[in-house]
Amino acid sequence: MIDATAVAIEVRDRTDARLRRAYGFEEVALVPGAVTADPSEVDLSTDLAGVPLRIPFLAAAMDAVADAAFAIRMTEAGGVAFVNLEGLYTRYEDAEPIIERVVAAPDGRAAAHVLADAYEAPVRTELIGDLISRIKAGGGLAAVATTPASAWDHAEAAAEAGADLFLVQSQVSSARHISTSGRVLSLSDLTGALKLPVLVGNTVSGEAAYQLMHQGAAAIFVGVGPGAACTTREVLGIGVPQVSATLEVAAARDRYLDETGRYVPVVTDGGMKTGGDVAKAVASGADAVMLGSPFAGALEAPGRGFNWGMAAPSPTLPRGTRIKIGERLRLEQILYGPAETTHGTQNLVGALRQSMAALGARSIREMHGVEMVIAPAIATEGKSWQLAGRE
């Protein structure tokens, strides 16, 4: 006779081994503690691979978000903007007419074709040096990003030009890459050869992050396809909700710290639409957050109110889309307010400071220890009261 209970347990165990529950920003909430702090006493400073920042906000390496001028402004505001070394600013001496063409293109296939054409021009090494020099001349932090395939060549040019941070960023990063063709990037060789912090992204795996730390990664970026301008999750089916992914990578960071004494910052990259999302990312263990579309909405951003993923112009499998941001604000207002409405991307710094104060966290590290709960209904409770006529 078949033992139905034993069979059910075996099926459940196999399912649990292959399928686990993961949580995004909309499904969790932060729990107020017994201690609160004065918002003025909350310190939002953080350290990114040895580079001190006044605020834990990074602008994504997307052409519609960060050019040399925006990088300078972001530095002045206390954060840092990463500029894409494989983007328009290293393909053209003047990218303004190209961006105007992308912005003016009709929606749909026309926009895709214009994007593809825009990125057909080759990357020019001399423009990498020019780009970094302009940022440094304006007093900005020169943070640059490239893909693994171009990392060696671009790293040498970036280091020679005086870059401050070098991000090797791909759709999914791992310490082991299976390939039978082309030059395989060895992160340990790259970090050992460069006198420049090498940051790595993106991953959603604690084990992958742990291995990358052992290979010398100066920071780990978390997130696969969560951004508004990226469609990786829809096209490839790959990704883990950001709260769970950040918690897992942060646990790997803490394990690595205990074993080696070296602290590797964790950056949650993408998927955050409001100040509350940013607070949840930091509570999950992030030392900083990287935002794309919220900063693409800045009046100072080069995309003129549009944003597009860096995989959008891929000739074989586009995994991004051009999106219209809508309301545009000054960068200062996005970061520091005043918040004129309840729009979630106004006064991000103030919102994070208020959240931390209410939880008694006076620093980013203290915020890592606050309590979180699984609460998928919390965002709708206010609407429920309104529907019941009990505001």
Image (cartoon, rainbow, N blue to C red):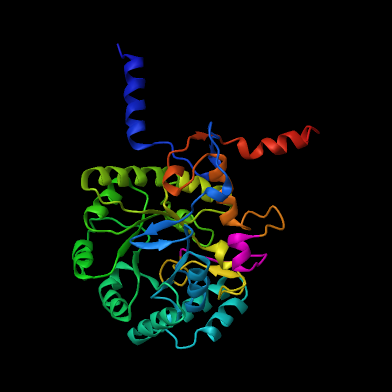
Does the magenta run of residues contain 321? yes
Left or right position of 108 against 132: right
| Quadrant placement of the C terminus | top right
Is residue 284 in view? no
State which region is magenta: 319-337
Does the magenta run of residues contain 386? no
Residue 328 image offset from top left, x and y in percent: 65, 67
Image vertical order of residue 297 relative to residue 220, above or below = below
Left or right position of 36 against 249: right
Left or right position of 122 against 77: left
Image vertical order of residue 145 relative to residue 220, above or below = below
Residue furthest out toward the top: 1
Residue 347 image offset from top left, x and y in percent: 61, 57
Residue 378 image offset from top left, x and y in percent: 61, 36
Image vertical order of residue 273 relative to residue 382, above or below = below
Residue furthest out toward the right: 389
Q: Residue at x 32, y 14 (%)?
A: 3
| Quadrant placement of the N terminus | top left
